[in-house]
Amino acid sequence: MSEFSIENLAFHPSLFEGAAVCLLEDDEVETDLFPLIVLRPVWDLLAGTGTILEHVRRASNAMPLLRPREHLRRLCTELWPEAGNERPALGDITFLNGRLFELRPERQNDFPAMPTTVVDTDGRLLFARRPVAEAQRLLNEHGNRLASLLVQEGEAADLPTGWRAGLARQIWDVVLANPELLRTQLGAQGDEFLGARPLRDLGAGVEVCSRRGGATIFVGPGVKIHPGVVLGNHAGPIYIGAGSEIMPHSYLEGPLFVAPHCVVNAGTRLRGGSSFGPLCKLGGEITQTIFQRYSNKQHDGFLGHAHLGQWVNLGAGTTNSNLKNNYAEVKVRVGGRLVETGHQHIGCFIGDHAKTAIGTVLNTGTVIGIGCNLFDAGFPPRFVPSFHWGGAELLVPVPLGRVLETARLMMARRGKTLTEGEEELMHRHYEIIIRKESGA
């Protein structure tokens, strides 16, 4: 068992007892979860208090074997060299669909055994467990081929009653699930969680909404909370990671996760249900939104029910709509067609290395690809292909070299560089986009 309480884990440890773990992703994530998965495997998406991979590692106490889409293998080696390719000689292997951000029983002390092969209502593999001798051959496969073999060669069953699964079928699923994920993962913790301890002593001028009976506020080492900050733990637990700084007159409302080394600018309002990855800079009003890493929204403007990739920068006054004026359910463009989300509150989804100019306004359900740069007055289209610059009047593809140059300049400010795997993926995706533009 890991240092984490079982009731707070996204995955139940019984799934991994006596077994190595293998994470896999299907090829359809390219369409379903665009643009957030262009430059990362699906298990690198932030959900609640960590990425999907981090949640699996917390529950299993081990680094999984990784079976990404074929063209992401180089990137995965760069990101997780410790994953390696060593195969266990004994025991079982638990295969997990990388789209799963939660798989846990409804009641910790009363749950049925998990079948050896579990699929969702669409027949998509969720979970499989195989003896090592049987699994060795399967580990040579990737993507849909691996998932299909696990389903075809097993006795597939539905998820048993009493278990709860969270699955990123579409790009908005994690954002909508995030408030409950945070309540589960931050609730009923002990004296420490991810290196942070419950806040005991308030600094001068810092206020807590509920001193008695309120949810826990976890604060990591080196955190600076300035006078005038209000911590809204009446609405849920709050986590502030090591080295983060909360500037004066900010309001942080739970449930909330702020990873290490973030900066929350003066006068910021962080509403409940949001998760921010490491080294983000935050400002204005943000509600139920996820930032991956190294992304900035430093100025005034509203962002709600959104999910941003890495190295995104939103100019001053950038605002998105997360609710239609007629209160109708929002549609989002997925793979060339408009898909009913079934929800009223849906914001925007922005790919890595995208930028917006000052005063940019985004309509409900807007999707922006990687490497985009939006400017000019008015609402840009609700779907902006990757590597396009412009706005409401005109959007044009730009040379990849310009996107790479901007990316290198932004990353250098944080002491980072593009890896060979990232550049390889950007070149691959650029060729796909240009072929679509040319009709080839």
Image (cartoon, rainbow, N blue to C red):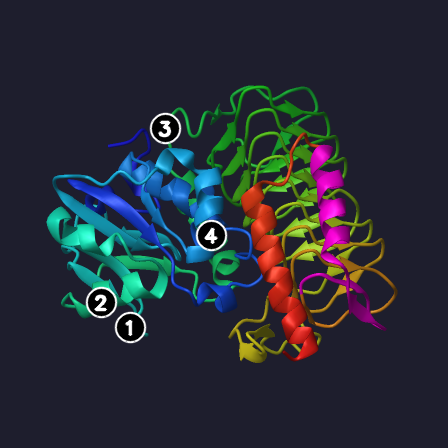
- Residue 218 position in % (x across, y down): 50, 30
Residue where numbered disc 2 is placed: 151
Residue where numbered disc 3 is placed: 190
Residue where numbered disc 1 is placed: 123
Q: Is mark 3 on a helix, strand or loop?
A: loop
Residue 115 visible at all = yes
Mark nearer the N terminus (2 vs 3): 2
For this rendering, which residue is in front, 350 or 430? 430
Describe residue 13's horizontal placement relative to residue 185 as left or right: left
- Quadrant in the rendering for residue 232: top right
Mark nearer the N terminus (1 vs 3): 1
Query: Residue 25 has which mark?
Result: none
Q: What stretch is highlighted in magenta?
A: 386-413
Q: In this view, does 95 lie above or below 149?
A: above
- Quadrant in the rendering for residue 69: bottom left
Label 3 Cα neighbours within 10 Å, binned few <14 / some 14-19 / many ≥20: few
